[in-house]
Amino acid sequence: MKKFVAEQSFWELFPQAAIGVAVVEGMKPASAVPTEDAAQIERLLNRSNELAERFITSSTISENEPVRAWRAAYRAFKTKKGARCSIENLLKRVLKGNPVGSITPAVDIYNAISLKYALPVGGEDIDAFEGDLRLGVTEGGDPFLPLGENEHDDPTLPGEVCYRDDAGAVCRCLNWRDGVRTALTDDSRNAFLVIECVEPERIADCRAAVDELAELVERYLGATTRVKALVTAENPEVVIAE
């Protein structure tokens, strides 16, 4: 049995946060997604780029509310220099007139949800987890090979908030950068999908985003949703695999 556990150290920093979780099984590999479905996913992504414009009220990226909220969150723990929440990077592209483009069907789906709701969305290959997945403040030194690197280990910092399992870090600086070991690939079958919300007034948005994310993965990738939950300080853990 594997669990996802948001540790007490996380709730001490973010007592009103919510973590939306969906575990999906049996996803089609990218090569098996019909052309017409891939085209529909791309259209959804294009529409989400347009919808994201409603969250951009200032030409200064840091003054937009979703970005402001996450910049404040990142000041609460130790981060790598220049680390930013994933949603800031997506919204910055929209602001600059450089919409987020298509990558693969699975990534396009969760980028579409992230843009539509202006919430960070991530995905990991659940079969690559070693033991429980935990979210909390680390003492540092957790092994981590960043995506895009072949051999340069970049361990966590003391006081950093990260996702980690028994083998090391899974995602650095809460939702900044995934590692190679657990990253979703075109052939991943089973996924742990996660949406973080640090704005208590937007928890309903987080719940809706998780529902829509799971529904789209079922519809277009042929997956089955095995777990769907909202993790909070009152309900800080959920079983993600038997």
Image (cartoon, rainbow, N blue to C red):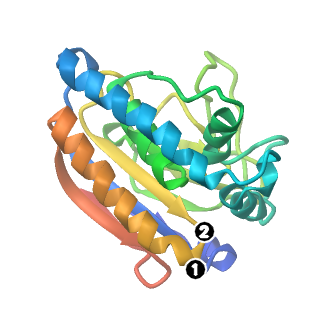
In the visual, does 17 lie left or right of 221?
right
Residue 89 falls left or right of residue 42: right
- Residue beneath the point at 35% across and 29% down: 43
Which residue sits at x=14%, y=36%? 222
In depth, the one of 97 and 170 nearer the eye is 97
- Above/below status of 15 relative to 106: below
Image quarter hosting the C terminus: bottom left
Which residue shows up at 58% across the image and 52% down it? 54
**Which class describes the residues within 10 Å of circle 2: few (<14), some (14-19), or many (20+)?**
many
Q: Which mark is residue 195?
A: none
Circle 2 SS class: loop
Residue at the spot x=25%, y=44% of the render? 216
Q: Visible in this render: residue 148? A: yes
**Quarter placement of the N terminus:** bottom left
**Mark closer to the chain start, 1 or 2:** 1
Q: Mark 1 touching mark 2, by CB under 8 A? A: yes
What's the amino acid at mark 1?
Gln
| Real-space Cα separation, disc 1 to disc 2, in angstroms | 7 Å
Whether residue 79 is visible, yes or no, is no
Residue 119: image location, x then y, percent: 53, 55
Give the amino acid type for the residue marked by disc 2 in the picture: Val
Question: Residue 60, image x and y in percent?
Answer: 82, 47
Percent of width and height locating residue 48: 45, 41
Q: From the image, tell me which residue sits under label 2.
A: 198
Residue 116's place in the image compared with 219, above or below, is below
Q: With respect to residue 206, does 11 lie above or below?
A: below
Label 1, on which residue? 16
